Image (cartoon, helix red, strand yellow):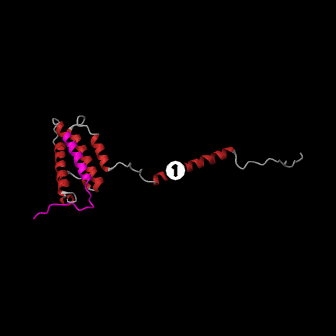
Amino acid sequence: MPEINDIIETSDSSPLLWWWQWALIAIGVCLVLYLLSILLKRKQGPPRLSKTSNLDLALQQLAGLDSSKNDSNRLAVQLSLIVRQFIQRKFGDPALFETEEEFHARSTELERFSAEATEQLKHYLTAVADHKYAPNPNHPAALESLIEKAELLVRNLDTIDLSVPQETPQAS
């Protein structure tokens, strides 16, 4: 029988982990950090809006409209949306989600505005509705005047402070 040799002692210690094990650990750490950053971004909420005021935003949208490139129906729809979005953002009013008739029917809600602003708003929305539902492509000047009226209306509505009671004429 052959002679059995004992295990030879060496002074080299074996590595705790091999190189490929260290690479897997590094990849795992990077993956965990990436997932953590995604979760933190998601929990931060929506991105902050720019410091553009409600009035400035509406005026920028109105300035971006070009009556020569749009048909009267499309332009009237865009004008209506700009004014209604302004009212919704400024006053928390549900005007964006209502038809013109529904908006006019809410007389108690419209008392929050001054009588002049209410009348101006009613006349403007009626004029826009006329262009929206009975478009007349032969009147570009009328469309330009609607854009100008929208700008004046938005500026007028921006001056209203709902914390101050509005003066309304009393019926006698």
Q: Which residue is located at x 70 percent, y 46 percent?
A: 18
Query: Residue 23's spot in the image, x, y percent?
Result: 64, 45
Q: Can you see residue 37?
A: yes
The secondary structure type at the circle numbered 1 is: helix
Q: Local crowd at mark 1 within 10 Å, few (<14), some, or many (≥20)?
A: few
Q: Which residue is mark 1?
A: 37
Amino acid under label 1?
A: Ser
Query: Residue 127's spot in the image, x, y percent?
Result: 16, 46
Q: Could you tell me which quadrant the C terminus lies in?
A: bottom left
Q: Residue furthest bottom?
A: 172
**54 left or right of 35?**
left
Q: Which residue is located at x 46 percent, y 52 percent?
A: 42
Q: Can you see residue 1?
A: no
- The vertical placement of 11 against 139, above or below, is below
Viewer-closest of 91 and 104? 91
Query: Residue 90's spot in the image, x, y percent?
Result: 29, 54
Q: Which residue is located at x 31 percent, y 47 percent?
A: 56
Which stretch is magenta?
A: 144-172
